Amino acid sequence: MALRRWIPPAVLEAVGSVLPDRFQRFEVVSNWDDAERRCIGYEQSTIQTHNPTAAANGEKDHRPTSRDLQFIAAVGICLASSRPGPPVRVLDFGGAFGHYFDVAVSAFPNLSWEWAVVETPGLVSLTAGPKAQASISWTSDLDVKLGERWDFVLASGSLHCVPDPMGVLAKLAGIAPYVLLTRLPLWPLDHHLPAVQRLSRWDQGGAYPLWFFSEAVFLEEVGAIGEVVLRFDVPEDTARIAGHRNTYTGMLIRTKDSS
Ligand SMILES: C[S@@+](CC[C@H](N)C(=O)[O-])C[C@H]1O[C@@H](n2cnc3c(N)ncnc32)[C@H](O)[C@@H]1O
């Protein structure tokens, strides 16, 4: 909304914090099933807001963000340490239209890639035409991809969207020496909190369930699968929920599976 540009952030924050629950972008709910009951879910939200131009362009028409630079740094660490490939095999969980594939191709022009995006069936169907290339593919069958070895697993903004994030993380950590988790909502809480995220305060249509992770519990769980070798803030992603406004987190994990 253009008005946002003219209103000082502190005023927006103060006004936003006193709006009723139904106008909050993030709302705490009692459990995951409750969150699912209250919204149309990620798949329908994506389809509703799907932008065909973004799919056709592979979302290339934008300036680099800190997310892109952090991704490049993490891949750089993985490449320097384990010298994978060719091709470098990447499993991109919740990778949407494959934006980070484009970033990788631009940032490391001397490498070849075999890139698999695991997405919801709805999103996979949207990717069928526009971006078909030999080195990137889409599937909704995570189990098949878990049966293969990968050099690098990426889960950007997706782990907190699934009902059993820690179960998924344990599986992802078992198939690659490096896992990059980014756009993670880590909060000063004592347990993981289920919530609903609305795409807009004013349009109650698009919404999906998500987790806000207890930072302490999450780090303990990550400790069981590997070691965090790089940790950073993701300044583009912030939220206010459960009495805290926080910036999301990224972390590169060297898994216990690395040999
Ligand atoms: C916040 S978006 C992040 C997209 C992209 N990775 C990025 O960082 O810009 C979350 C993505 O997770 C996907 N997603 C949600 N549930 C999923 C599931 N069960 N399996 C695979 N992907 C899922 C959504 O379709 C969506 O593309």
Image (spheres, helix red, strand yellow):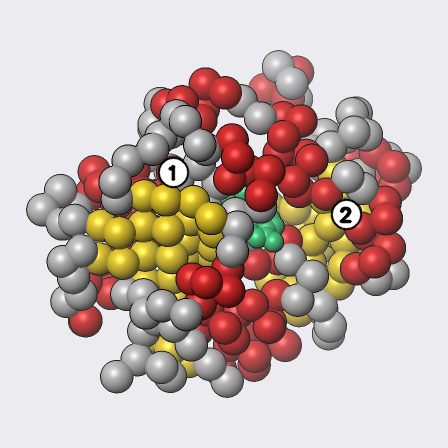
Q: Position of residue 12 (x, y in %)?
A: 71, 30
Q: Quadrant of the N terminus?
A: top right
Question: Residue tagged by mark 1?
Answer: 99
Question: Residue tagged by mark 2?
Answer: 196
Quadrant hosting residue 252: bottom left
Q: Position of residue 64 (x, y in %)?
A: 33, 34
Q: Residues within 10 Å of mark 1 (few under 14, many from 20)?
A: some
The answer to whether 144 appears left or right of 106 in the picture is right
Image: 69 above or below 131:
below
* Residue that appears at 56% across and 58% down: 159
Identify which amino acid the numbered label 2 is placed on: Val
Q: Secondary structure at mark 2?
A: strand
Q: Nearer the viewer, mark 2 or mark 1?
A: 1
Quadrant hosting residue 257: bottom left
How far apart are the alpha carbons under marks 2 and 1? 25 Å
Q: Quadrant of the C terminus?
A: bottom left
Is the CB of the residue bearing disc 1 within 8 angstroms of ligand 1?
yes
Image: 59 above or below 249:
above
Instruction: Please name whichever residue, 48 or 229, is drawn nearer the observer in this view of the structure.
Output: 48
Q: Secondary structure at mark 1?
A: helix
Marked residue nearer the N-terminal end (2 or 1): 1
